[in-house]
Amino acid sequence: MPHISVIIPVYNRVDFLRQAVDSVLAQTYRDFELIVVDDGSTVDLNSIQADLNRQGHQYIRLDQNRGVSAARNVGVAHARGAWMAFLDSDDRWLPEKLARQMAFLADHPHFRICQTGEIWIRRGRRVNPKKYHVLASGADSFRQSVARCSVSPSSVLVDRVVWDECGGFDERLPVCEDYELWLRLTASYEVGLVAESLIVKYGGHADQLSRSLPAMDRFRLFALLNLLVEQALQPSQIDLVRLEIRRKARILEKGAIKRGNPLADLYRQLHQATFLPDVDLERYQLWRDQLLAGIRDSKVEISPSLRDAHDIEGD
């Protein structure tokens, strides 16, 4: 049985996919299986499928486009490894990526989640992350993950036991699905950080999901509300989440008022009531469900070509 299962979701993007696949196959750590999940592509990926099958790896084709969350979850369902790794189809790994992570985990066996540093390339040029782009690590993992998406899907390794315990990507979310998952995981587990840049993330091309929707904080707000409702949190964690709900709701309220969005009143309620002592979980559940319904009513649509693409600034 392979020790690591590597999952790449893809919709079309032949050239990017070839680069991503090659970077996995070039790993110096060899105890892995590679699973490419074709999310209903409309272009010919047969040559890549044939190469993977010839080398004993898996190529799974979905009958229709279901989105990146479903594609990743399908990959995990077919995985045999003790650890799960993910790679977006427009990113690539450096050859020592898995080897460095496994060495780190051998030295720090208490970590059940591990990620690495990143190299960012935008429109062909290397760029430096902003100061606020902090990668989650150690005891601050949850606080960092509440503030923004601080775990990179393309760098993370997750223990399969932890994955099964916390559940996979939320298929209701067209974007920010990684932010939502890392919230759930870091609420219970710290993230180990290999302080080396071992993945290359490419940004700036047109078909990137995190560039495709306005007011993406709607989905992050849903993730925070869902966390309060569904997960048993420590009092300090609850305070962090409520504070972030208040901050995001205020920003969204201003934008919704300006645009005449009917969700403005819901954002106002969340902004004003977050720290009232009599706000219980049933109220948060109601707000969560109203927000999800409002997002659906707004007819958020994403082109299938964008559903497996994340900008380098993350969600």
Image: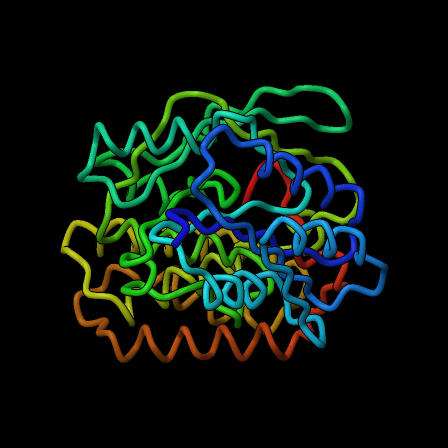
State the residue at coordinates (32%, 64%).
Answer: 164
Q: Residue furthest left?
A: 235
**Which x, y percent locates residue 99?**
41, 29
- Residue 204: x and y in percent read 74, 35
196 vs 176: above or below: above
Residue 137: quarter of image: top left
How is colour applied across the structure in the image? Answer: rainbow
In front here: 214 or 201? 201
Q: Find residue 293 and report its horizontal and vertical position in percent.
A: 53, 80
| Rendering coords of residue 166 (x, y %) | 31, 63
The image shows residue 123, relative to residue 128, as above or below, that is: below
Q: Quadrant of the N terminus?
A: bottom left
Closer-to-camera residue (243/166)? 166
Q: Going 68% across and 33% down the picture, which residue do you hit?
A: 202
Q: Is residue 124 left or right of residue 21?
A: right
- Asked if residue 269 lies left or right of residue 207, the reply is left
Closer to the camera, 41 or 295?
41
Is residue 308 or residue 141 the one in the foreground?
308
| Residue drawn at (52%, 41%) of the image | 154
Left or right of 225: which side holds 57? right
Whether 311 is drawn above or below 160: the answer is above
Q: How many marks?
A: 0
Asked if residue 111 lies left or right of residue 94, the reply is left
